[in-house]
Image (cartoon, rainbow, N blue to C red):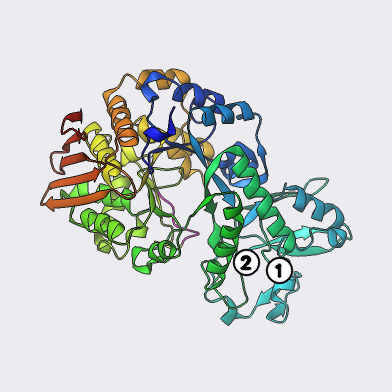
């Protein structure tokens, strides 16, 4: 493929390396099919491509390739196909099985990595009271603004070789198995004040660039900067200082950073990130499109599109993804009663809401496939995709949306407690993919993606206009003498997509 054929913000497929057929090699084979020719510019491969142990990849042991489901040959084939990569870098934490933590367990205070992770008592020394359990209880005023992801303090008591129990900061998952030799599961927070952590950061970015990454998604980065008395999520200025320093490392390897952060629209974090020069996730679009289709009005969707263009915000947008549909991000953009109505609608259609350790409306996602969230209506799914492809930004395409995947309640039940996200992570066999490639809801999406990826009218710097009157919406892109037009009816769930080339001829119609 000739990279010159593609616009600068072409579509990006998003999948686990074992999502389509069982291995990354199978995904390569799918993308080499005639139906997928020229449909994608990029591929966001989720982090189970690395050596990991929990959370389907997000608990990284090390950033080597997991040879059970991926290999260097498949990565090379993706490069040969002209696909650049978006890969994850988990800044805040590493698995307890990481070589650094295992060295700490083995050597204790003699480990070179003793400061690689955050010793809780050293962090809070002078700022609290020692408990009989051996950890410091911080002064109440110093933790009142902290947000803990699970009940209690974020501590894992670690057994040192000398028999001491030493508390380490553990924001996310943990499990202790009292076996003959004590075993741990979990994700340990990294100490960004340690020079060894910054050496690790640079080495990781260099590794990802070597795999073919052009974009690096910074997962959970806003939890990394910590100071007594400051917020442990998005503290300022610590968050921005961290990002700037990571960006300096990324610049050495020509990597674009995509910081992942959820916050209500009214907090304007997306705007702050953009003004600092970063790409941002459009976490508002999934809910706005559902709202537009349910209400028959695109007024708020239009206002958001115009804000993106007026402020020149470079977004990566999506419908579904490996997480849930982020509806509470809409706070401040649409009335809260409409947000609740959207949540209720998706739950009625088989989705799940999981509040964060019992705190209502803290958890910002509703778990469902996008197709099921739309009532498993093919016309709605196609119109949602058309709207996404015509919105400003680089469209990210969840593989299960592409194949009109339905809520997988069986997978949720099988996963047990905390398995709600499995509703939208179904692995497809090659046979299932072949069957679904015969369905119009799939073939039309592929045709639209090919148009979006190759037609010159699109681009970050193209001319963009959007109009909405009641349920009627028109979006127009103009660039290089070409024009792309989407006419949509939000009540009838119908649309017409056209491409006019630089000779004034109709080059595409669907």
Instruction: Rate crowding at label 1 as few (under 14), some (14 to 19) or many (20 or more) other CA atoms within 10 Å.
Output: many
Res 425 visible: yes
Rendered location of residue 224, percent (x, y): 60, 63
Q: Is residue 355 magenta?
A: yes
Instruction: Rate crowding at label 2 as few (under 14), some (14 to 19) or many (20 or more) other CA atoms within 10 Å.
Output: some
Do residues under tags 1 and 2 come within 8 Å of each other at their CB atoms? yes
Q: CA distance from mark 1 to mark 2?
A: 10 Å
Q: Is residue 47 magenta?
A: no
Q: Nearer the viewer, residue 260 or 178?
A: 260
Report the residue marked by disc 2: 153
State which quadrant residue 434 falls in.
Answer: top left
Q: Nearer the viewer, residue 508 or 488?
A: 508
Magenta-drawn segment: 353-358
* Dot 2: element: loop
Q: Main secondary structure of the magenta part?
A: loop
State which quadrant residue 49 falls in.
Answer: top right
Q: Is residue 166 left or right of residue 503?
A: right
Q: How many marks?
A: 2
* Dot 1: element: helix
Look at 38% across and 38% down and name the residue there.
11
Look at 64% across and 47% down and name the residue there.
206
Rendered location of residue 41, percent (x, y): 42, 36
Q: Is residue 264 left or right of residue 115?
A: left
Q: Is residue 189 left or right of residue 288?
A: right
Q: Is residue 348 above or below residue 431?
A: below
Front label number (1 vs 2):
1
Mark number, residue 120: 1
Rendered location of residue 63, percent (x, y): 66, 43
Q: Earlier in the sequence, mark 1 or mark 2?
A: 1
Rendered location of residue 226, percent (x, y): 61, 70
């Amino acid at each position: 493929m000739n990279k010159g054929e593609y616009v600068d913000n072409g579509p990006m497929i998003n999948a686990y390396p074992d999502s389509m057929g069982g291995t990354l090699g199978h995904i390569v084979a799918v993308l080499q099919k005639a139906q997928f020719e020229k449909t994608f510019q990029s591929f966001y491969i989720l982090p189970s491509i690395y050596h990991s142990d929990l959370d389907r990849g997000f608990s990284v042991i090390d950033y080597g390739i997991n040879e059970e489901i991926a290999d260097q040959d498949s990565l090379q084939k993706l490069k040969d196909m002209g696909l650049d990569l978006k890969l994850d870098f988990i800044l805040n934490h590493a698995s307890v099985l990481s070589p650094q933590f295992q060295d700490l367990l083995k050597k204790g205070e003699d480990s070179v990595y003793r400061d690689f992770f955050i010793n809780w008592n050293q962090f809070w020394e002078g700022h609290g009271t020692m408990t009989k359990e051996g950890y410091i209880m911080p002064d109440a005023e110093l933790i009142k603004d902290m947000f803990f992801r699970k009940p209690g303090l974020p501590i894992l008591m670690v057994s040192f070789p000398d028999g001491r129990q030493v508390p380490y900061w553990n924001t996310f998952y943990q499990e202790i198995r009292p076996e003959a030799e004590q075993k741990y599961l979990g994700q340990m927070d990294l100490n960004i004040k340690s020079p060894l952590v910054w050496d690790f950061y640079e080495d990781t970015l260099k590794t990802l660039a070597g795999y073919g990454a052009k974009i690096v998604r910074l997962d959970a980065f806003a939890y990394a900067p910590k100071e007594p008395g400051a917020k442990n999520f998005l503290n300022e200025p610590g968050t921005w200082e961290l990002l700037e320093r990571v960006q300096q490392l990324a610049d050495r390897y020509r990597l674009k950073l995509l910081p992942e952060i959820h916050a209500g629209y009214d907090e304007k974090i997306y705007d702050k990130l953009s003004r600092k020069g970063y790409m941002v996730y459009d976490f508002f679009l999934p809910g706005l499109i559902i709202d537009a289709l349910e209400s028959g009005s695109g007024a708020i969707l239009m206002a958001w599109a115009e804000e993106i263009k007026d402020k020149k915000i470079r977004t990566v947008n999506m419908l579904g993804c490996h997480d849930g549909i982020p509806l509470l991000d809409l706070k401040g953009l649409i009335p809260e009663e409409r947000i609740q109505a959207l949540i209720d609608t998706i739950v009625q259609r088989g989705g799940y809401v999981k509040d964060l350790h019992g705190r209502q409306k803290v958890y910002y996602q509703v778990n469902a496939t996008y197709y099921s969230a739309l009532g498993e209506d093919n016309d709605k799914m196609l119109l949602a995709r058309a709207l996404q492809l015509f919105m400003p930004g680089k469209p990210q395409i969840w593989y299960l949306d592409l194949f009109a995947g339905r809520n997988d309640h069986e997978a949720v039940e099988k996963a047990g407690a905390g398995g709600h996200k499995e509703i939208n992570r179904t692995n497809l066999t090659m046979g299932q993919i072949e069957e679904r490639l015969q369905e119009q809801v799939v073939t039309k999406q592929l045709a639209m993606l090919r148009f979006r990826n190759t037609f010159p009218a699109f681009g970050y710097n193209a001319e963009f206009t959007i109009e909405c009157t009641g349920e009627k919406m028109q979006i127009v892109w103009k660039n290089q003498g070409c024009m792309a037009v989407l006419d949509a009816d939000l009540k009838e769930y119908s649309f017409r997509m056209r491409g006019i080339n630089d000779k004034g001829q109709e080059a595409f119609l669907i």
